[in-house]
Amino acid sequence: MSNEYGMRQSLSMNYADAIPAVKAALKEEGFGVLTEIDVKATMKQKLNEEYRPYIILGACNPNLAHKGLQAEPELGLLLPCNVIVYDAGDDTSVVSIVDPMIMVGVAENSALQEMATEANARLTRVLESLQE
C-alpha cells in the first residue's frame, strides 16, 4: 500500500515486536538506523500530551547516500530516509517508508534517478520481507 509520498505496510505484530523486525529488515538491505525519535515520549515530555506508540527511524544506506551526495551536495537536506512504525491497535502495527523517488523529484537532478531507483527497490524489499 502507498500514499503520495511513501510506501506503507500493515503488520500482524505488536509495536514492540515490529521495531526490531523493521530494523533487521533494513539491515538486510544495507540500511543502518542513524536516528530514533520516540514520538510518544516526545509529545509527553514537550506537550504533556498522550500519543500512541510511534517511532521515527532515520535509515541510511552509506553507499547510496555517498552516490547521491556526489551528484547533489544539497541532497543531505533530504537524508536520511524516514521510516515510521506505529501502534495500530489490536496487536497490529504499521510501517511506512518515505519514497526515495518522490524525494529526488524535489531535487530536480536527473543524476539522482539511478540512486533513487536502487533505494526504492531496496526499501520495497524491506516492506515485502515484513509481510512474510
Image (cartoon, rainbow, N blue to C red):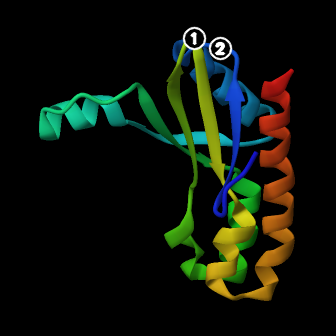
| Residue at 61%, 31% in the rendered image | 94
Q: Is residue 60 left or right of residue 40?
A: right
Report the quarter where the C terminus lies: top right
Measured as percent of width and height from the top left, residue 70 is found at 70, 77
Could you tell me residue 128's position as x and y percent?
85, 34
Q: Quadrant of residue 21?
A: top right
Name the residue beneath numbered marker 1: 91
Q: Residues within 10 Å of mark 2 (few under 14, many from 20)?
A: some
Q: Dots 1 and 2: beta carbons under 8 Å?
A: yes
Residue 42 position (above or below residue 124):
above
Judging by the rendered image, the residue that carries numbered circle 2 is 13
In the displayed structure, does residue 92 sit left or right of residue 118?
left
Which element carries disc 1, helix, strand or loop? loop
Residue 90 image position (x, y, % from top left): 55, 12
- Tell me the element at label 2: loop
> What residue lies at 62% left-to-right and 81% top-to-bottom?
106
Mark 1 belongs to which amino acid?
A: Asp
Report how far apart the C-alphas of labels 1 and 2 lie in the structure.
6 Å
Q: Name the mark on residue 52.
A: none
In the figure, is residue 51 to the left or right of 33? left
Give the position of the N terminus as an image quadrant: top right
Mark 2: amino acid:
Met
